Amino acid sequence: MSALNTAEIVLKEEPGKGSLDEKKTDTKEPEQESVEIVEEQKESARDIYFRNKARKKKIRRRVALLSVVVVVLIAGVFGFFTYRFFSNIRPGVTIEAGESLPSVDDFLYDPGRGTKCDTDLAKISNREPGDYPVEFSWLFFREEAILTVQDTVAPTGEVKDMICKIGEKPKAEDFVVSMSDETDISVRYVLEPILNKEGTRKVSILLEDKGGNQTILKANLTLYDETNVPVIKGAKDIHIFTGDSVSYRAGVSVLSKLEPAPQLVIDNSKVNLDKPGVYPVTYSATDQFGRTGTVTINLEIEDKPEDYDDMILMNEKADQLIASIITPDMNDMEKLFAIFRWIRLNIPWSGGRSEHNEIQQVINGLDGKPGDCYTDAMTMKVLLDRVGIRYIMIEKNDETGMHYWLMVQYEGNWYHVDPTPVYITQFVTFLSTDAQIQIDSDKYRPHFYDRDTRYYPTTPVISPCKVVYNPEVKDYFLEVGDWLPGADSEGIPR
């Protein structure tokens, strides 16, 4: 557009409605304005030039930067595809703990392509599970593979049973005889065992390796108390004659809370069966824990008496009678009453003995022949020996007369028993107290039980039972219960 045209446009756009004269008067002003406009136009063109130049420069920089990006992108894509399709490195290798480490070739697709391993594989532990990086280099690339050491096999082991004292605290490791795994093994209890109670119990031992694999093994734990020694029961003094054999184990047993029961050992090294005397015999029993219980008895050996054969006969008759009146379920009171009742009902009273020989008196009594208080007392003595009830023979022999009876031990206490029948049916002495026999003696037979009380044990105040005779059936009956001295003739305590 020309300068003139520009001026015309400016004039046309000038507002106002001036007169013609005014227009004529101002004919020089547009010329001046056009000059100014031209100058302004010239300045605008210069700005446009420099602006366009700057724009072109910026475009050139962008084109250069874009070229660099494109080149880098192309190089990256080329490198990726080169790595993707031409890499010689496997992503990883996995071995089981304990296996031999892989060689470098195990990581390569093609060992002949010149790939270099930059990691020393020998420094990697094949017994420590984990992921281990292995670095390689080839061409201008550096790559990393992973060596995985895994543990999927549970440990194996063997345990033993243990015996401990109460108070000892065995560790889980103490039960282990052997264990095996390619990694380290930890040992612990599945549940902590009870350690304050005697007996045998199962314990579970847990083996766990580094891979978390577990094995549970079972063992027995036996706890014992040092004070609980084996108890030897039934050992008692033995009386024999010279030349007799001895059954040391007859009636002897060993009691133990734990199995197996300890063996009984008998030391009779000091005994001479052919020589009269008193010899010690020691019974001992040692259990599996080393606890020992001992009992020592006396073996008394006497020369055979002239009436030895009669003694054998007496014992045989006594054993036969015991077998007929005693049963295994009887307690000591019932055994004592059975013997008392048999003597009172089967040995008639004669008021005098036919023999002064003790053994013959007993044989006569066991045969049911008549006898006196001596016969009755001696017969009861022999029978009590056969059933193992302790007794004391009492002999009264003074100016008031002669009488024999016994004191027997029942549940640790001593009581009077008189197997001799008398004609007064209320007068029955069976497990009677000192007070009771004195009352009965004063009432029915004065001085019947006179004795020197210094030499005999004192009885309790109360009797554990009473025996009553029924004349209609001519038999004796045992009534169990506490009886006070002075009970009436019906046997009812006051």
Image: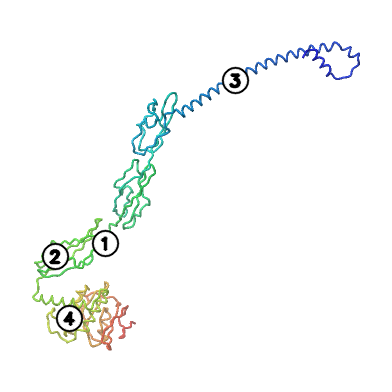
Residue 254 appears at what percent x and percent y?
A: 23, 63
The numbered dot on residue 63 is: 3
The numbered dot on residue 256 is: 1
Name which quarter of the figure residue 53 lies in: top right
Residue 447 appears at what percent x and percent y?
A: 22, 84
Q: CA distance from mark 3 to mark 2?
A: 128 Å
Marks 3 and 2, the one that precedes in the sequence? 3
Q: Is residue 374 visible?
A: no
- Secondary structure beneath dot 2 equals strand
Q: CA distance from mark 4 to mark 3?
A: 144 Å
Marks 4 and 1, the one that precedes in the sequence? 1
Q: Is residue 329 above or below residue 290?
A: below
Q: Which mark lies nearer to you, 3 or 2?
A: 3
Dot 4 alpha-carbon crowd within 10 angstroms: few under 14, some 14 to 19, many 20 or more: many
Q: Which mark lies nearer to you, 4 or 2?
A: 4
Residue at position x 78%, y 12% in the image = 3
In the displayed structure image, the side of residue 306 where residue 33 appears, left or right: right
- Secondary structure beneath dot 1 equals loop
Marks 3 and 1, the one that precedes in the sequence? 3
Q: CA distance from mark 4 to mark 2?
A: 33 Å
Q: Amino acid at mark 2?
A: Tyr
Marks 4 and 2, the one that precedes in the sequence? 2
